[in-house]
Amino acid sequence: MGSVLSRKPARGSRFHSTVRRAAWGLVLLPLLFPSACGYSLQGKTGSRFADPGIRVDLRPFTNESLVPDGGAYIAARLREEMQRSGFRGRFDRSMADYLIEGTLRGIQLNVVSQGAQNYALEYRMTIYVDIRVTEVARGRLLWKEDGLSNSASFYSGSDFQYTQSNYRVAFQEISLRLARRISQTLGEIL
């Protein structure tokens, strides 16, 4: 009689082990080679956007809305989006090559749907931003756009926290969309 530890594996277990390893290999393959999906972090060819020596002065946006940290939040998302889009320079106020100034002009809320007792069930939030990009050395205005906007809907309810939470999520979503739009334009003009 042999011991329990010296038993030979079941006949089909080697096959399952090989299949399991192959499946894990297929799952991990995209993680090892992310560039194979076609996504690249490069700016436009010949663009200074991807130049590691470039310096950009990007301060928190001036806030004219009722959201206390609105301008700072949008500027922070813009920094993240610029880096995600291939910006390799530094954000530095001193000796900056470019100055990016923004103003959060306001947030407009419109009722989209109402309940039976004229209680708002859904709102549409629109954020308005002004943006200005200047080349510091020459004092040349590269891009200026007033009233750049984006919108998103959010649900409201009788619970104040539920409504405010949805309000904040909508604000964050719109801020990210605006930051992506501005970052894409910066990638083209720099």
Image: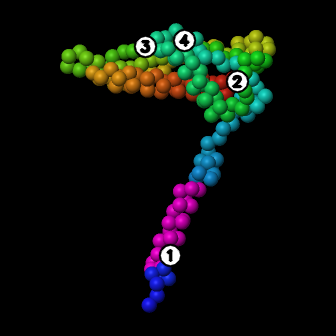
| Residue type pointed to by label 2 | Phe
Under circle 1, the secondary element is: helix
**C-alpha gap between disc 2 and disc 4:** 20 Å
Which quarter of the rendered picture does the C terminus lie within?
top right
| Residue type pointed to by label 1 | Arg
**Looking at this rendering, what residue extends furthest in the left direction?**
116
| Residue type pointed to by label 4 | Asn
Q: Position of residue 173 (x, y in %)?
A: 47, 27
- Residue at screen point 52% across, 26% down: 177
Label 1 crowd bin: few (<14), some (14–19), many (20+), radius 10 Å: few
The image's mark for residue 63 is 4
Residue picked out by circle 3: 108
Task: Tell me: 186 left or right of 107.
Answer: right
Residue picked out by circle 2: 91
Which quarter of the rendered picture does the N terminus lie within?
bottom left
**C-alpha gap between disc 1 and disc 2:** 56 Å
| Residue type pointed to by label 3 | Gln
